[in-house]
Amino acid sequence: MRRRNLYFVYPLIVFILLVLLFPFFVMVSTALKPLEEVYATPPHWIPRTIRWANFGDIWAKYPMGAYFKNSFIVALGATLVNMAFCIPAAYAVARLRFRSKSFIMYLILVVQMFSPIIVVISLFKIIARLGLLNTLLSLILTNSVFTLTFSIWLLGGYFRNVPKEIEEAALIDGCTRLQAIVRVLLPVAMPGVVTTIIYTFITAWNEFMFALTFIQSMDKRPLTLGLYNFIGRWTVQWQYLMAAALLALLPVVILFFFIERELVHGLAGGAVKG
Amino acid sequence: MRRGKFWKTESGLAFFFLLPACVFLLLFMFYPIVYVILMSFFKVNKLGDLVGFFGFGNFRFMFDRPEFWQIIVRSCVWTALAVAVKTGIGLVIALLLNVDFRGRKVARGLVIIPWASSVPISAMIWQWTYNNDFGLLNHTLRTLRIFGEPPIWLAEPRSAFFANLWVDIWCGIPFMALVFLAGLQAIPQELYEAAEVDGATPFAKFRFVTLPLLSNVLTVATLLSILWTFNDFNVIYVLTGGGPGTSTDILITYIYKYAFQYLRFGPAAAMAVITFVILLTVSILYARSYFKGGGVY
């Protein structure tokens, strides 16, 4: 649309942004306050003394190092497992012809929407029987399963957009199918691979319900569960929780900006491709 | 490709490539679903072992409790209200971001942040924000005199429901806004110009150009949003844990409560099966409208 009558846009946008970012202002404000200002009535927005030490204290007072490490192991492990299954499957649905393919694609899209809650009851039994309760491996497995279908969907879309001729040329030049995939297709489709990796990593990093169900001991908790356990103690040190939340959110929020467009297109499909 | 051995054919290769993913999904997704369905028809002890066939006993147990029906109604109200508001606000934001103003890219980036943020952690931040004495929400509402005396959000059933609902809406707005924005940008500019030549008012352009061309995006996004909203476990669990009592539980949190707090796995499995059927129906509708909007594969 042309630039005219723009005077109504700015106040509206500013109002919407103030509402949408409200809790993040709260988070930053609280994370920088000393204890007595956190529990001041009435509360105030701008800290009178800025206490950067909150960000240092949380590492000493809570096992933040372990939380970060666990989240990282789970997210990385889930990503690796996911990609190992996802790359060949995405290649098959994008490149190869086989019977009942459209049915399988349909199934993948439907399964992608299932809530983990439906299966968590029985999954709990299965994880227990495998002896995996209270292990990070249980989270790696469940997170990679529940991201797999959408990953296949996302990556398959990328593979399909790479011209078939590039691969055929490699095959004619004497590459095996596997070499053609690894040396030709994957480098060309690298943006897609990266998007899928980031998607899986973020989803596993943010996961809460499986961790809540499968993990008991303090030293195995990922960030989401670890931070949740800040609350529910007798007194909550909100300035510490907000400082920890800020650190936990920062990496994934930044990563998310690289994939948001692909996520929107992957989820809404042809409807937004114009 | 050469003929002969199975794995040298194209469908043979496809089979090999799909096999690992399929086995993985069968083991950790389909088998658990089948197991839950089985559980729902059995008596299950507190350890989660099947101890005897129960027919529809678990289902009847739930159906006989008035609380269960309250939760069904609440889940429907929850989903309907949240999706309606997300769609409305999302559409408004999309229309605003579609205007070519200075700083639009920055605004778009900032709008995304609630979606980019981790839902359980956002819910924790909101819990602090809602705090009556020290929280900045009620402080702001008092200062701006929007509420004479704002409710103690998480303490009382009705306000706690709306407090939960708002956080769910807040998480869902960015996706709706972005998807509608992508849909708006796919509408050819010529159509608006043609409408202008015909003397259409801005409202007429919206009603007769934008809305019809956006209808497919609207359907897909709304169905997705219904699935996500109905499934929103994190917000309610972190904010109120379904409390006070079970006054803010929806089906999905109630299942979890029944299984892992009351250790009544049978009734929990029965509710999971009911949820499964509901989700399956909406998912199929979603998949249909997804493929309708320019089928891929």
Image (tube, rainbow, N blue to C red):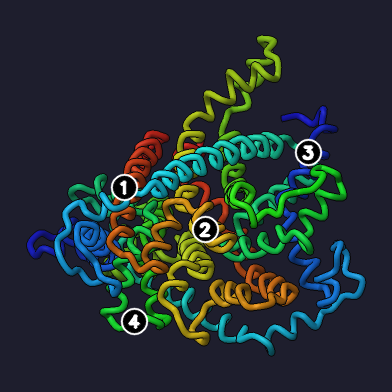
What separation in Å lies between label 4 and label 1 (alpha carbons)? Answer: 37 Å
Identify the residue at horizontal 57%, vertical 75% (top origin). Answer: A223
Q: Residue tagged by mark 4?
A: A132
Q: Nearer the viewer, mark 2 or mark 4?
A: 2
Q: Nearer the viewer, mark 3 or mark 2?
A: 2
Q: Label 1, label 3: how many angstroms apart (C-alpha)?
A: 49 Å
Q: CA distance from mark 2 to mark 4?
A: 32 Å
What residue would you read off at disc 2? B245
Please tell me the numbered disc located at residue A12. Answer: 3
Residues tagged 4 and 1 counted as in contact (Cβ below 8 A)? no
Amino acid carrying label 4: it is Leu
Could you say whether the residue bearing mark 4 is in a helix, strand or loop? Answer: loop
- Which amino acid type is marked by label 2? Gly
Does dot 3 land on a helix, a strand or a loop? helix
**Marks 2/1: CA distance?**
19 Å
Point out the tag, 2 or 1, that comes first from the N-terminus.
1
